[in-house]
Image: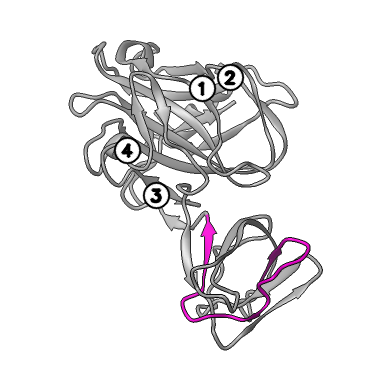
Amino acid sequence: MKNTTLLILLTLSIGAHADQCDNHIAYASSGTVAVSAAIGASAQNGAVAYSFFNAFPCTSTGVAFVVKTIDSSTTNFYGFALVGVNGNATPGLMYASTGASTGPAFTAAGAGGVQALPWQGGPTILPVGMYMLVLGTTCSSSCAQLFGDAVQGHFYSFIYPDTATGTPWSFNSSGFSGFSSVNVPQVSLTLSTTATQTVSGTTATVIPSDTNVGHIFVHGVVTVQGVSKGGATAMNCTGCLVTAVNNSTGAISYTVPSSPSFSGTINSGATLAVSPVLVEQAKFVAPTALIY
């Protein structure tokens, strides 16, 4: 099965409208997505998140994917969840979920067939922003397989797995739980103590010690801690929108409250947390899936 065949199958199998979402995670058939909770599998420890960027407001009614190997077990459960990360999407908010489907229901289309699952709560409107499509399962052996990207075959904004069983997100026969604004993908950067944060109106600017800020982008979200003279443990800004990035100096500008009390010298140990990070597809094979 070639990539173009999968593209045609996914496109034709879902009737699209002008304002309907049309986002995808990979369009490939060279890889095998083992939907297993085993370490290194595509739903490690129960759940793995794969990113996509939604460029315009749209209405999503479900997710479609291509089955490679069926699972006939009624005791294994599978599902997808759509969770906001940043931009106009609310970090940690589960916008939609398929709930938990048994092996026969999840792979009902048969090997080589396109399976479409609607969102449990019906159509949902997605604002512009970064999202994670989370693949969950309770299966640990003889699990369903989907078509997907080759290992190291593509570059994604992030791939974020459960780091332990059900941590930070849980999936069971009742569906998904555990999503919050504090456990969406992020990375922490140390801020330069030789640079002074500047504040103009509702815009603050800081400079990380590491000027390689290519993974921070305008309309992304940052959290800044320890800028004020009050101590590095103070949380100065949470979920603040990035308004400008200077890739030459590393300066990052972001929105702050109208009367910030944390301008001035940056403390030792001050950090800026970025969400999401950019990482290379290296370990987890992303499923060929269409968010429609």
Task: Determine which quarter of the picture holds residue 69.
Answer: top left
Q: The N terminus is located in which quarter? A: top left
Residue at 42% over, 36% down: 178
Q: Residue furthest bottom?
A: 194
Quick check: marks 2 and 1 in contact, CB under 8 Å? Answer: yes
Task: Estimate the spatial distance between the alpha carbons at disc 2 and disc 3, rounded to whole Å.
Answer: 25 Å
Q: Indicate the position of residue 198 as horizontal and vertical percent values.
A: 71, 78
Q: Which residues are magenta?
A: 252-275
Q: Indicate the position of residue 270 as horizontal and vertical percent values.
A: 51, 74
Q: Indicate the position of residue 245 as horizontal and vertical percent values.
A: 67, 69
Looking at marks 4 and 1 on the same chain, the residue that comes earlier in the sequence is marked by: 1
| SS for dot 2 | helix
Which residue in the structure is indicated by mark 2?
12
Which residue in the structure is indicated by mark 4?
42
| SS for dot 3 | loop
Which residue in the structure is indicated by mark 1?
9
Residue type at the position of mark 4: Ser
Could you say which is closer to the camera, residue 67 or residue 229?
A: 229
Task: Estimate the spatial distance between the alpha carbons at disc 2 and disc 1, rounded to whole Å.
Answer: 5 Å
Q: Residues within 10 Å of mark 1 (few under 14, many from 20)?
A: some
Q: Is residue 267 magenta?
A: yes
| SS for dot 1 | helix
Quick check: marks 1 and 3 in contact, CB under 8 Å? Answer: no
Residue at 54% over, 72% down: 226
Residue type at the position of mark 1: Leu
Looking at marks 2 and 3 on the same chain, the residue that comes earlier in the sequence is marked by: 2
Residue 153: which numbered mark, if any? Answer: 3
Residue 278: which numbered mark, if any? Answer: none
Q: The C terminus is located in which quarter? A: top right
Residue type at the position of mark 3: Gly
